[in-house]
Amino acid sequence: MSTRTALRICPLCEATCGLTLTIDEGRVTHARGDRDDVFSAGFICPKGASFPALDTDPDRLSRPLVRRDGRLVEASWAEAYEAVAAGLGRVIREHGGESVAVYLGNPNVHTVAGGLYPPLIIRALGTRQIYAASTLDQMPKQVACGFLFGHAFAIPVPDLDRTDHLVIIGANPLVSNGSLVTAADFPGKLKALRGRGGRLTVIDPTRTRTAELADQHIRPRPGTDAALLFAMVNVLFSEGLTDLGGLQGQVTGVEEVRALAEPFSPEAVAAHCDVPAEDIRSLARALAAAPSAAVYGRIGSTTVEFGTLCSWLIDVINTLTGNLDRPGGVMFPLSPTGRAPRPPKPGRGFTTGRWRSRVSGHPETVSELPAAALAEEIETPGEGQVRAFLAIAGNPVLSAPDGERLDRALAQVGFMVSVDPYLNETSRHAHVVLPPPPPSQSAHFDFAFTNFSVRDNARYSPPPLPLADGRPDEAEILATLVMIMYGAGPDADASVVDEQAIAATLAKETADPHSPVAGRDPAELTARLTGRTGYERRLDLMLRLGPYGDAFGTDPSGSGPALTLERLLAHPHGIDLGPLKPRIPEVLRTASGKVELAPATLVADVPRLRRSLSDHSDGGLVLVGRRHLRSNNSWMHNVPALTGGTNRCTLQVHPEDAARLGLTDGGPARVKGDGGEVQVPVEITDAVRPGVVSLPHGWGHHRDGTRLAHASREPGVNVNQLLDGSRLDPLSGTAVLNGFPVLVAPA
């Protein structure tokens, strides 16, 4: 068998870089950047370079596991599906589909199957017990944008290639490669910003690699970003620096925000944030004076006590400085699989709390309940108790607060199914584990990340390698689960799921007078679809109905300018769809049809922020997280090439704090929080400010019953075990994973 190359979009972070894979004897042996990729132009990071090692990891499961006599043993796919049908079927018959909880992990947004099938599974179950990594990550941004723009996925991203002043809050994109903003070669884009005379400001308590590149680094006390941002809003109003630019007449609530900002003068927040008032004033003035500017915040600004207010205030500033929806500011990408634009009109608006969790009464947000509430919903008896659990590409035992409690809860759940390539800290509890094939045997299209791309594009990767004999792809696995949920039996034809999804979509579109296929015959349109598989036919449908599609026009071959699956296949390096373009008012779904700058729900939470201003440091320590370039949450610690070096689980401590506490570099420290304590090696560094310690996320691979040979050799500790789940941002249900108090002492 000769050596050949194949193209594949990297699925290992949000940058979505194009890869060129070397395949030798049916095995991926090397990966480099695809220089002709229209989006990434050859950029690659260590995660992408490790694609072969991850793809061929000997600990990846190749066959399903079924629990028999208390042990997980290999089984055939037919046996595994029969076990799922029997176990879940029993729970659903006895307690209803609403007794089944579903957890969706972060990897779902990195696969074709994860983008298409989980909503169908949830609909088949009829459950409201939905949990996800969202409430451990970005949900505050979704809630804030939902209230501002009327839709939780209308999230503006910084126009990196054209901005003159970029302000980054609580993000380290030189290491993370960006998040909620899809930008291949983020380091290159920041250097290009500096090269064209632009300015980079970083607001972060830690001197990250991104902060080291900045023109200005502001180091507030962790968790005080919302107060600092409100002070900037105060300056914009008090000094007459607001200018809505092209959004005049498109924004409501400006005067209400002015009144809300009055108590938050720079002088009023300076002690609370530990940032000089003049630094706050000068930053607000610089943003207002810049020809274009963009404020961008990420996990350090969302997984905090005031995460939703912070996310809201970021776009309040973008709006008040005239930088919302304009080149060089923050803009709304136009995904190739999004709906074709409709005439602008008011929508239904956005709300939360349509239902509440059974035990603690947490409000739903974007149809999800807080991940921190999952354990109590399993443990607490009574009507509506979670009796079965389906985890799709998730490891909440490490990702959610108080993993020890969730670990115990999962051990007692009536029936559990895990769709996961590894036997990890969560899937070890499953009664059935269904492993998807490795990335080299999977297709790729970024349904999620084209919504956050800094430049519109469309790229599709067919599977570089064929599936092993008898092995289903992830789409078939999830489609079979849909059939089982509907009671069709484990041997039912899973292709029906895609056929019904296509039929339902076309029935809705042809009945919509504003759809590009209004009044057309669904059967005729269905016959025009191309694709080898059900998911490819669904992708073709979405492209044709999308903003760049041919809407089943006169070009069924796909050779013309409009987007179809065939055209994507003919352009393996992708199709560039151009720079971001203004989309207001078309993108808005608020009840007023305008940007609603002062939503009542957010306004009602401002007094809580005002009360926090009296909270100054008492000399105690607060903890913040940390990201590694060669890691992505808990995914990659089993790949030897991605561990070691700087990718270590250490507690970073400032020299002054280390001396005061008697800590030594490399020596053990005991760290105690609300939910427990961990023992971890100390790394003394002035990269963290005094009063702050930093511990990375995703470690803690020490439990028995897993198959993570390399990760278990250097397991690290689970930082989330320091939390008991009681610290949440009340507006989004997001766990406070940054800026919480800890006690640290020599071990």
Image (cartoon, rainbow, N blue to C red):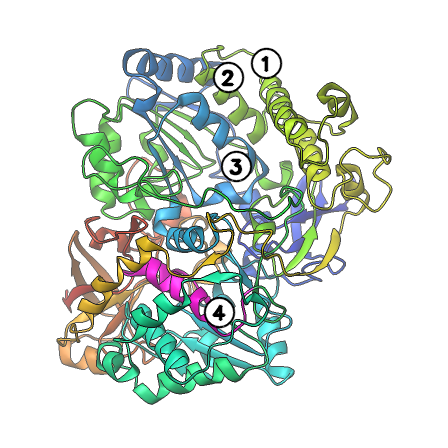
Of residues 46 and 617, the one nearer the viewer is: 617
Secondary structure category for the residue under label 1? loop
Q: What percent of the width, then of the height, locates residue 404?
A: 21, 43
Question: CB of mark 2 within 8 Å of CB of mark 1?
Answer: yes
Residue bearing the label numbered 2: 483
Q: Is residue 19 above or below residue 510?
A: below
What residue span does the magenta drawing correspond to? 296-324
For the residues labelled 3 and 2, the Cα–Cα distance comes to 16 Å
Asked if residue 172 lies left or right of residue 491, the reply is: left
Identify the amino acid type marked 3. Gly
Label 2 vs 1, first from the N-terminus: 2
For the residue marked with disc 4, what is the amino acid?
Asn
Labels 4, 1: front one: 4
The label number, if any, that marks residue 318 in the structure image: 4
Q: Which mark is residue 114?
A: 3
Residue denoted by label 1: 493
Crowding at mark 4 (Cα within 10 Å: few <14, some 14-19, many 20+): many
Q: Quadrant of the N terminus?
A: top right
**Disc with the residue nearer the chain's start (4 vs 1):** 4
Q: Of discs 4 and 3, which sits in the foreground? A: 4
> Which mark is first along the chain, 3 or 4?
3
How far apart, in angstroms, are the residues tagged by discs 4 and 1? 50 Å
Measured Cα–Cα span from mark 2 to mark 4: 46 Å
Q: Nearer the viewer, residue 539 or 28?
A: 539
User: Which residue is depicted at the point 31% across and 86% down?
Assistant: 277
Question: What numbered label is drawn on residue 238?
Answer: none
